[in-house]
Amino acid sequence: MIMMSSTRKPKKMGLTVSDYVRQAALNGKVVEKKFLSLGDAGRLSKSLGNFNQAILLAHVAAKRNDDPAFINQMNILISKCEDVKTELINLVKEFRDDK
């Protein structure tokens, strides 16, 4: 019973028991291993494509319109899409660097 409960936490964190103990002994803390499933990677990729498309459409719409208020709104939309796109790219890089 003791052995079963002591292996549950490392498994739940995506670590082997030896990795868990090693991290705890050397660092005084244990960092959970991060996983990105194939489905999640596909959804992230699709989201990045959607943000690229939204940015492109906003640029095109802004160029075709003379209304300064509309152009300003499109610039705000472009800026927000680029911010979210950057966050998604950083998230993917974080998972890639974690291996």
Image: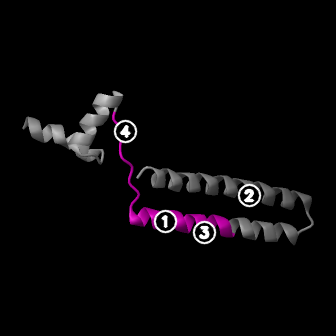
33 in magenta: yes
| Mark 1 crowdedness (10 Å alpha carbons): few <14, some 14-19, many ≥20 | few
Observer-side mark, 1 or 2, equals: 1
Q: Are marks 3 and 2 in contact (CB under 8 Å)?
A: no
Query: Which badge, 3 or 1, is on the more N-terminal residue?
Result: 1
How much space separates mark 1 and mark 2, taking CA atoms? 21 Å
Q: Which residues are magenta?
A: 30-53
Query: Which badge, 3 or 2, is on the more N-terminal residue?
Result: 3
The picture places residue 87, in percent across and down from the top left corner, at 59, 51
Compared to residue 53, the image places residue 20 above or below, namely above
> Label 1: which residue?
43
Looking at the magenta stretch, what is its main secondary structure? helix
| Mark 4 crowdedness (10 Å alpha carbons): few <14, some 14-19, many ≥20 | few
Quarter of the picture containing the N terminus is top left
Observer-side mark, 4 or 3, equals: 4
> Label 2: which residue?
77
How much space separates mark 2 and mark 4, taking CA atoms? 36 Å
Q: Write the residue at 33% across / 27% down.
A: 28
Compared to residue 95, the image places residue 57 above or below, namely below
Q: Secondary structure at mark 4?
A: loop
Q: Write the residue at 33% across / 35% down.
A: 30
Q: Is residue 29 left or right of residue 47?
A: left
Query: Which badge, 1 or 2, is on the more N-terminal residue?
Result: 1
> Label 4: which residue?
31
The picture places residue 95, in percent across and down from the top left corner, at 46, 53
> Label 3: which residue?
49
Q: Is residue 62 left or right of residue 31?
A: right
Question: At label 3, which amino acid type do we have?
Answer: Gly
